[in-house]
Every structure is written in C-alpha cells, then in structure tokens.
Image: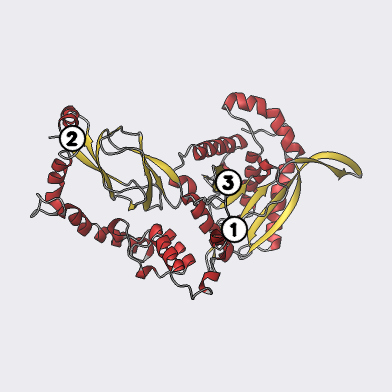
Amino acid sequence: MAETVRVTMPQLGESVHEGTISKWLVKPGDKVVEFEPMMEVETDKVATEVPSPVTGILKEILAADGTTVPSGGEIAVVELEGAEGAAAPAEAPAPEAPAPAEAKSAPPAAAEAPPQAPPEPQARQEREPAPVTADDKTESGEHRFSPAVRMLAEEKHLDLNTLKGTGLGGRVTKKDVEAAASGRASAPAEQPAAAATPAPEAPAPAAQDGDERVPLSRIKRLVGENMVKSKSTIPHAWQTQEVDMSGVVANRNANKTKFAKQEGFSLTYLPYVVMSAAVALREHPDVNATFGGDAILIHRDINIGISVGIEDALVVPVIRRTDSLSIAGIARAVNDLATRARDGKLKGDDLQGGTFTVNNSGTFGTLFSYSVIAPGQAGILTMEAIVERPVAVDGMIGIKPMMYACFSFDHRILDGLQAARFLVSCRKWLESLTAETPIY
C-alpha cells in the first residue's frame, strides 16, 4: 500500500501565523516534486510561491483557492513516490486512491466510523477549532480574528462577532468581511448617512461605457490598509534639504566600471543615500524609534527598509543592521532584495523588523515627495532626482548635481529641531564624499 503524507501550511515568517492560498499550481493527479512550487500563498506581509515538501502524486486538495489556513493546518494529501507509489496511480485512478488515505487517517480521529466518507471531514472539523482558537487567544486575545481581518472590519464598521466564518476551523476571513460589507451596502436604501464614510467607492456605480473595473490585488489592498492606518494615527510633518551630490557622483563614476565587473550588477546612487541614513541614525538614535503610547522605544539595531516596485504595488524589504555594512555591502543587499522582490521570492521575514525606510522616487525624475510613514517607524527619507542646477559657490555661479532629500517624520516622536539635525547629518555625510572614498 502506497504511503501518503498530509501537507501542512508552512510558517511563512517570524510573526506570520496564517496564509491565504491564492492559486494552486498543480491539480489532483499531478506529480509534485520536492522543492518545486506547488501553490502561491499570500500573507499580510508578502506573496510567495510555496514549494512541495515531498515528491509524489497529489491525491487531494484540502484547502481550495482563496482559503486562509493557519500555519500547520492541513492543505493537501500527497502519495509518496516509490516502488509501490509508481504503480498505484496507473492501476487505481482517482476514486480508489483516496480510500486508503482516509482509512489510514480516520482511525486516530474517529475510530468508530472509519468506513463512512462524510464523518472524516466532520472529525477534522471537530478537532481543528480547539488549537485554532487557542492560537488566536495567544496571538490577539480574540477568537479567529487576524489583525488584517480586524482592520478591515473597523474600516467597514462591522461587528466581527456577528459574522459567520468560512475559513478553516470557522475562522472569519477577509472575504467574509468584504461579503458582509457589500451585502450591507446594497440592503438598506434608507441609510445614506452611513455610506458617507466609504465615499471613495461612490464613483463605481456611476461608471460609464468603456470604463474598466480592476479588482484590487491582495498586496494593493494590504498596502492601502496600512497607509490608511498610518495617515489616521501618525501626525506627519515634513522637512527638505538640498544636497550637493558632486562627491557622490565623482565616487560612483570612479568605481562603477570596476564594481560592475566585480559584482555583476550596476552601482547606483541608492546605496549612498541608505548609508547616509544609517550614519545619521547612529548619530541620532531618537530617529530610529517607535511610538509606544506612553513611551518611545529606541531600537538598538538599525534595520533600513527600501521601497521596491513590483508590478502594480510596492514592497519594503529590510536590510538588517545596515550600519554594519560598507557602501558596496549595502549595494549587494539592495540588489538581492530588489531582485527577489521582482521574482516573487521574498520571504515574510524579509519584510519585517524595519526601523526606518529610504524611498527612491527620484529614479522617476521627481523633485519633491512627502512619503507616508510606515506604522511603527519614526520616519522615511526620500531621495529625489539628481539634477544639474546653477548654484552659488563662494560668490560665483557654478553648475552642480543637486538633490533634494525629503524627510517625513512622526511628530509624536520627533520635533522640528530633531528632524533638522537628522537631515543635516545625512546631507553632510553625502557632501563629504570624494572620488577617493572607499566603497568596500
């Protein structure tokens, strides 16, 4: 008899406790190969491909597309490849293959009724809610409500306790919240006042011929929720300083050919600005902080996130202990994270633990950007386009490569003086570089 294993949802990150299966890449009857992708999973942090943990034949999918499954929850049954397994699929098509698996797995859960097919899902249903509920109590203090679900429910003004969950173990998923919100919006015609809050959705009914409705991707939706949280909870303030990038340009020009030959990718200006932020954060640790209600938490490690564009969204992978790296080391980290982000190979941990963010909107030619602060951080530094401009130098007019450095900061943590001191440190470090400054 061929041996089967039950594949479970892996732990996709340090603080990620569930994932939503966005798409199965294989179907029952297909061969799965260990370490090769078998499905695409989305979490609150990242979308990624999940490889098969074993090689064999996929016999049954236990969690369909769109299902949110906690880490460790069963998602599929795979018949292991082997001498017996190779013959089994050919001789016994679909109906008979699951029978041994059910017969083997049913006795531990429901020993009295192994022959009947219906009790098996019921038995699984009966034994799953206990650990799921216990996990939720441990993580959030509430039953079956993930942080993303609670955030969406608050936005839609819904009481989660009134919703019936369709997720694994009866968990309330974001789809349940969205379905309840859309149902409520279409039901009462006499409540226009309540519809005033989600005003941005109003143009949808007024769509004209030829208009196209594009559903939000999960990442786009999560980013939007995060930005709403940021703007509604963080009092943003902004400062800008102009930076003479002559030394940075000279240093890059002196090193870019050798660097590209040695490293295999181009040296850009972003690592220089990230390094300036790391140096300034070391000098001004109050900027490397999180607002904690009745206290400010100043972080020991300097972990700088960098904004990376992927298709129609942005992700912010993190360079850990950035201040311990050289300019070349930061360049390697930026290239690695950006490449994996665009290839869809980031892990949940790559997007966690950031204490500050650097954004490079200047690559598109922007001159001023006041970016939204990531919740849990004190600020975000944006490097703008480097443009040759006429400037006054010792009473003379000269043409220099100039850049605006824009700083958005949390006014609960920093005041204008602290923000200015941080920006001055960034500017002075960038302006101190020469062609001879080592990058390794």
Determine the secondary structure under disc 1. loop
Horizontal and vertical percent position of residue 3: 17, 36
Using the image as rendered, state which of residue 230 and residue 22 is in the foreground: 22
- Tell me the quarter of the picture where residue 159 sits: bottom left
Quadrant showing the N terminus: top left
Residue shown at the point (60%, 34%) measured from the top left: 328
Q: Residue furthest front?
A: 209
Q: Are marks 3 and 2 in contact (CB under 8 Å)?
A: no
For disc 3, the marked residue is 307
Residue shown at the point (58%, 44%) measured from the top left: 323
Horizontal and vertical percent position of residue 237: 67, 61
Residue shown at the point (17%, 52%) measured from the top left: 120
First in sequence, mark 3 or 2: give its number: 2
Q: Are marks 2 and 1 in contact (CB under 8 Å)?
A: no
Quadrant showing the C terminus: top right
Which of discs 1 and 3 lies nearer the camera? The answer is 3
Does residue 220 sit above or below 164 in this rendering? above
For disc 2, the marked residue is 93
First in sequence, mark 2 or 1: give its number: 2
Q: Are marks 1 and 3 in contact (CB under 8 Å)?
A: no
First in sequence, mark 1 or 3: give its number: 3
425 to the left or right of 390: left
148 to the left or right of 108: right
Amino acid identity at mark 2 = Pro
For disc 1, the marked residue is 378
- Crowding around mark 1 (Cα neighbors within 10 Å: few <14, some 14 to 19, many 20+) is many
Whether residue 415 is visible, yes or no, is yes
- Crowding around mark 2 (Cα neighbors within 10 Å: few <14, some 14 to 19, many 20+) is few
Q: Residue furthest left?
A: 112
Whether residue 298 is visible, yes or no, is no
Q: Which mark is residue 245?
A: none
Residue shown at the point (52%, 36%) measured from the top left: 339
